[in-house]
């Protein structure tokens, strides 16, 4: 009984924790502009993250080592450092976007300006990372993030023509008013939002935090193969809601407020309140995850003791890194940069950094030295290799597309 | 190790688990008996004995050891900053003698607790000056921290270590050009194979260089694909093998000399053995 | 990085930076494109304001949320209008400039009135503002059609 409860909890937190500010903004934006014609990208991205999250989770459970730990071992210190700097830059950018997202959600709920919230939010995130237990962070924000199910409820309430929606999703065609480069650009952005690089670092380090062993492989796989796709479905619900309400009106999403409007239309104040709670939980939880990921990556490169599973004084350099990150993020946001703009750039740069993250995982998951007899099977390797090609295509085309379309204009 | 005596030359190679220095030891995580993460194996210390055999004597950690492995201005800067911030006059990199190692698997396990190893200077500094000053840094019932070895004890250990002449680092060995009998360059030293000897260092047998892995390319890790015939995935294996198609192996008896000063390795034959040999 | 590698990297970075800085060539087509982009962006803000007012009148949105959204809309339209006005029109496009600038100015006013009425929780004011926004939205739609 207890085992079923644990599995259910894991799946629910995986669903609620899947959506972050990148998914929120990008899916809402794409839904309002392209309808459901880019949903196939979300599907591709979700399958990809499932494949690689399972791999990195398995590596953590079987070898007891987290992913970035092994990046330096396999790539060497120089290439490993380049990998670290690039991944860290992208994850830090995402961290900034998440904290900005929390501040925006609080601004919408309170009318107090976002900039005034920023230092408070950065401090609050840091305090949670400093003292809260890892499982508490995961469970609380994961479950609260389930509030975003309100978007699926809103779609249902709007009473759409499901056949038409299904047709649009399964027959992707570029809308008439948009150019092909713009369509491709947003495909890459959506892909980067779904396959966030920090997710696999966080997932495998989390596995070590929670002392996963081979007996936890089944639970881990349930979380990944059930939780992540359902989380992906939430992303699609967000896109569908803006496609139904905002697209016909010609409204383009460039603020967090606009993301919530379809829920207000469908469900009124109550729905909107739940949506705001969902925004807050998703961004706060993701802020914790990205902050921890920066700490994990640096510590695992240099071999420092890291993690919430030891007392803070025993992982001083790790916690000092987290503190520094929070301060830097707050400082960056206080330059009045728009968090939505930061989010839009962070998902594209995530796409660029994807090969750095996923390539080492594929290598390590095949190495019997770490995995014993639990190396990748044919399916994992086949999908992994296929996705490596897809990821390379996305990574290489991201920056040129950004320049050609002037970041999606 | 008694002063003046050089015991390293004697022990012959025996059967047993072989390691590749770069593949199995370098950049691996060091873990203490409590499961605490100590540091990374940033470099390895080796000593060339009178019989020209090269023995592994210690693990080196810290920016002082990692810097040179970065091969460039970044590495020099790393070492410069580290020596500036290090309290000692002539700082030495963190050193863990081979006698303290107990097992090598997905990590390198040491037999002594982190606090007793004396390689956690930066962690202690951050703990004292940054983290310790923050509220709620430690719980009420915290057991007293193990005291690090005192300055005197550390210096005494270092003096004993000093008795072993000719200490070098793996970073000085790897990457050296390998020249055949007629001076033709066969490639670069990508890795060295270490074999156990009948001598014992603590728990593990004393390891000595038993062969060279030579690669045509100067840079680029082989990611482990060269050592095992069927490691997946197929696509990556093909690509890596193609890039490193000129790699091969030379046993120690084919080595004439390691010329540290000139920075070359001279060998007695030009044909390399195939690499597909499992290290076990 | 080795010498040639560094040079290639440096050239690539420079090329990327230059490409992002280059402004498109002036000319009627490009000015017309700018006009369309401005009109579309203004439409998005005006329509958002309309939706918010509708939600307010049906009590389906919190007043602070509505206020935040409308204030953001007002700022955005203002910035769109200012940016468009600052662009030098090519010869022969002065009439186009005046027409679009006037339209954007109307949009600014309409959204401003909406924000004011919403903040006052003034039902009559919001009704008037909603009407004004509807008119501007229609004008913007016609302008976009004529330009495309």
Image (cartoon, coloured by chain):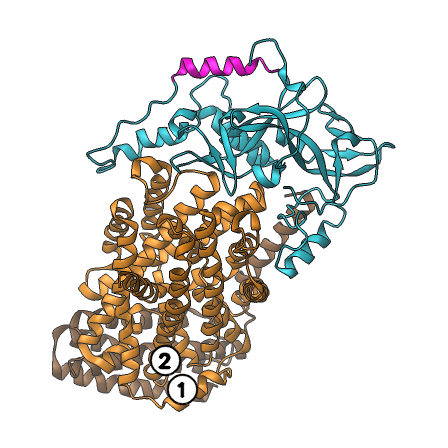
Quadrant for the N terminus of chain B, please.
top right
Residue B160 sits inside the magenta stretch: yes
* Badge number at residue A165: 1
* Chain C, hue in figure: brown
Whichever of labels 1 and 2 marks the residue nearer the N terminus, that label is 1
- Rendered residue at 12%/84% (across/down): C124
Residue A366 at x, y percent in the picture: 57, 55
Q: Main secondary structure of the magenta part?
A: helix
Q: Residues within 10 Å of mark 2 (few under 14, many from 20)?
A: many
Residue A133 at x, y percent in the picture: 27, 48
Residue A288 at x, y percent in the picture: 32, 53
Residue A196 sits inside the magenta stretch: no
Question: Of residues B87 and C137, which is closer to you in this image?
Answer: B87
The residue under label 2 is A240
* Chain A, hue in figure: orange
Q: In which chain is the residue bearing label 1?
A: A
Q: Which residues are magenta?
A: B150-165
Question: Of residues A310 and B221, which is closer to you in this image?
Answer: A310
Q: Residues within 10 Å of mark 1 (few under 14, many from 20)?
A: some
| Vertical side of B20 occupied by C12: above or below | below
* Badge number at residue A327: none
Q: Is residue B160 left or right of residue A13?
A: right
* Chain B, hue in figure: cyan
Under circle 1, the secondary element is: helix
Q: Are marks 1 and 2 on the same chain?
A: yes
């Amino acid at each position: 009984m207890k085992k079923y409860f644990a599995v259910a909890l894991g799946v629910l937190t995986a669903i609620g924790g899947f959506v972050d500010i990148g998914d929120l903004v990008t899916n809402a934006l794409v839904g309002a502009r392209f309808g459901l014609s880019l949903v196939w990208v979300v599907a591709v991205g979700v399958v990809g993250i499932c494949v690689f999250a399972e791999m990195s989770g398995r590596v953590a459970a079987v070898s007891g080592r987290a992913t970035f730990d092994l990046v330096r071992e396999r790539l060497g210190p120089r290439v490993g450092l380049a990998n670290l700097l690039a991944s860290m830059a992208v994850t830090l950018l995402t961290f900034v976007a998440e904290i900005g997202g929390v501040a925006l959600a609080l601004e919408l709920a309170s009318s107090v300006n976002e900039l005034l919230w920023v230092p408070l939010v950065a401090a609050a995130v840091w305090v949670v990372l400093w003292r809260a237990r890892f499982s508490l962070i995961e469970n609380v924000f994961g479950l609260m993030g389930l509030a975003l199910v309100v978007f699926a409820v809103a779609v249902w309430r709007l009473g759409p023509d499901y056949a038409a929606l299904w047709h649009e999703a399964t027959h992707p065609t570029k809308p008439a008013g948009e150019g092909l480069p713009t369509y491709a650009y947003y495909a890459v952005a959506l892909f980067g939002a779904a396959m966030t690089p920090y997710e696999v670092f966080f997932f495998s380090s989390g596995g070590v935090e929670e002392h996963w062993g081979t007996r936890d492989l089944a639970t881990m796989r349930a979380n990944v193969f059930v939780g992540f796709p359902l989380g992906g479905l939430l992303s699609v619900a967000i896109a569908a809601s803006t496609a139904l309400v905002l697209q016909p009106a010609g409204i383009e999403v460039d603020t967090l407020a606009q993301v919530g409007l379809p829920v207000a239309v469908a469900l009124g104040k109550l729905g909107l309140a739940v949506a705001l709670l969902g925004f807050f939980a998703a961004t706060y939880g993701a802020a914790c995850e990205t902050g921890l990921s920066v700490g994990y990556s640096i510590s695992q490169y240099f071999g420092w003791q890291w993690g919430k599973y030891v007392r803070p004084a025993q992982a001083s350099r790790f916690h000092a890194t987290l503190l520094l990150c929070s301060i830097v993020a707050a400082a960056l946001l206080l330059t009045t940069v728009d968090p939505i703009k930061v989010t839009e750039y962070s998902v594209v740069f995530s796409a660029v950094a994807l090969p750095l993250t996923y390539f080492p995982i594929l290598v390590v998951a095949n190495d019997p030295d770490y995995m014993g007899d639990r190396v990748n099977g044919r399916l994992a390797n086949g999908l992994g290799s296929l996705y490596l090609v897809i990821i390379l295509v996305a990574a290489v085309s991201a920056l040129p597309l950004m320049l050609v379309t002037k970041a999606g204009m | 190790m008694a002063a003046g005596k050089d015991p390293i030359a004697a022990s012959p190679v025996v059967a047993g688990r072989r390691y590749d220095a770069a593949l199995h030891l370098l950049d691996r995580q060091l873990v203490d008996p409590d499961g605490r993460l100590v540091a990374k194996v940033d470099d390895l210390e080796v000593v060339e004995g009178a019989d020209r055999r090269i023995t592994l004597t210690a693990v080196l950690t810290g920016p002082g050891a990692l810097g040179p492995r970065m091969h460039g201005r970044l590495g020099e800067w790393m070492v410069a900053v580290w020596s500036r911030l290090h309290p000692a006059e002539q700082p030495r990199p963190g050193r863990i003698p081979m006698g303290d190692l107990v097992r090598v698997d997905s990590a390198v396990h040491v037999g002594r607790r982190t606090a007793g190893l004396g390689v956690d200077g930066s962690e202690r500094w951050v703990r004292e000056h940054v983290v310790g000053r923050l509220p709620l840094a430690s719980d009420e019932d915290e057991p007293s921290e193990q005291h690090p070895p005192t300055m005197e004890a550390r210096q005494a250990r270092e003096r004993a270590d000093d008795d072993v002449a000719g200490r070098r680092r793996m970073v000085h060995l790897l990457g050296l050009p390998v020249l055949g009998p007629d001076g033709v360059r066969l490639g670069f030293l990508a890795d060295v194979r270490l074999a156990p000897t009948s001598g014992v260092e603590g728990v593990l047998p004393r390891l000595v260089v038993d062969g060279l892995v030579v690669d045509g390319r100067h840079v680029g890790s082989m990611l482990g694909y060269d050592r095992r015939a069927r490691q997946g995935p197929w696509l990556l294996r093909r690509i890596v093998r193609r890039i490193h198609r000129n790699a091969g192996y030379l046993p120690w008896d084919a080595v004439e000399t390691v010329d540290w000063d000139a920075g070359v390795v001279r060998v007695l034959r030009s044909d390399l053995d195939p690499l597909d040999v499992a290290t076990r | 990085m080795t010498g040639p590698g560094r040079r290639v990297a440096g050239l690539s970075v420079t090329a990327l930076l230059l490409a992002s800085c280059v402004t498109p060539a002036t000319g009627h087509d490009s000015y017309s494109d700018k006009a369309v982009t401005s009109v579309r962006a203004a439409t998005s803000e005006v329509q958002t304001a309309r939706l918010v007012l509708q939600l307010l009148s049906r009590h389906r949105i919190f007043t602070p949320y509505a206020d935040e959204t409308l204030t953001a809309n007002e700022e955005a339209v203002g910035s769109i209008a200012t940016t468009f006005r600052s662009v030098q029109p090519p010869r022969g496009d002065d009439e186009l400039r005046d027409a679009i600038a006037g339209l954007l100015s109307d949009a600014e006013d309409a959204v401003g009135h909406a924000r004011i009425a919403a903040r006052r929780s003034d039902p009559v004011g919001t009704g008037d503002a909603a009407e004004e926004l509807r008119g501007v939205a229609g004008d913007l739609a016609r302008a976009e059609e004529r330009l495309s």
